[in-house]
Image (spheres, rainbow, N blue to C red):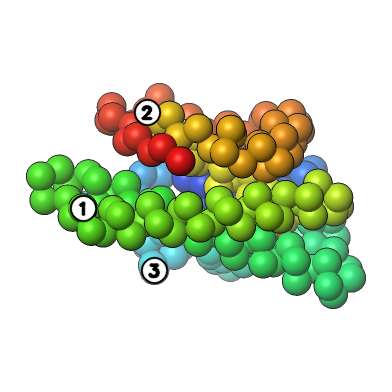
Amino acid sequence: MKLLWSSRSPFARKVCIALHELKIDDQVERVPCTVISSVKTPKEVLSINPLGKIPALQLNDGTHLYDSRVICEYLDLTYGPTLYPSDNQQRIRHLKWQSLADGIQDALLLWRSEIGRGEQCSNDICSAFEHKIRACFIQMEADAISLSSSVFGIGHISIMCALDYFNFRWSGSGWETTFPTLSHWHAGLSQRDSLLANPFDDNTAVASTRPAFQF
């Protein structure tokens, strides 16, 4: 299998963590790709995902899969089950956490793009993103006890990717102090092998200033 990915993509990281948890990461060739909304998408990406986004997975039979949710569920159905609870109530809970985390990451990516417009950046748009992110952190804090008590799965992977991406791209937020239960859960799960083996890496990116955010 061939995975189009970037070490800076939270969605690609989610897939890589899933591969590690399912013990099949050695069966997948990782192909580094750079996808920027303001730049023409590379042909190698469009040939696998016409939406021009990563991650995208090419199976051994030539089938193409995208996005991270579809890829992770395919991998679990094929090589699991491990990441999706069989109990319907627990499964829906994990899928809800995944949806929340994916929404956070989408918002952060769009927010960062807006900030990148420099003098043309809209304060109103940035304020709207900030309001949404605050609400999401409040929800994650409320869910932290359930996250701690439930069996590890796709919901945990997704929330961890969202929190780590926020730390990766935003500076000095102080969320760990404002949301102590969530912070305690995050700190403990950060030591899991699959997360340690798949860190965010910005060494190949163009240097940029990390925007500040204060809770």
Q: Residue at x 36, y 44 (%)?
A: 34
Q: Is residue 54 left or right of residue 188?
A: left
Separation (CA) of disc 3 from disc 1: 32 Å
As helix, strand or loop, the secondary structure at mark 3 comes to loop
Residues 196 and 101: in front is 101
Q: Is residue 169 visible?
A: no
Tell me the amino acid under the disc marked 1. Answer: Asn
Q: Is residue 156 above or below residue 194?
A: below
Indicate the quadrant where residue 136 lies. bottom right
Earlier along the polypeptide chain: callout 1 or callout 2? 1
Q: Which residue was labeled with disc 2? A: 204
Front residue of 128/208: it is 128
Residue marked by disc 1: 123
Q: Is residue 125 visible?
A: yes
> What residue is disc 3 on?
50
Q: Check the image and name the residue furthest to the bottom.
A: 88
Front position in the image: 144 or 105? 144
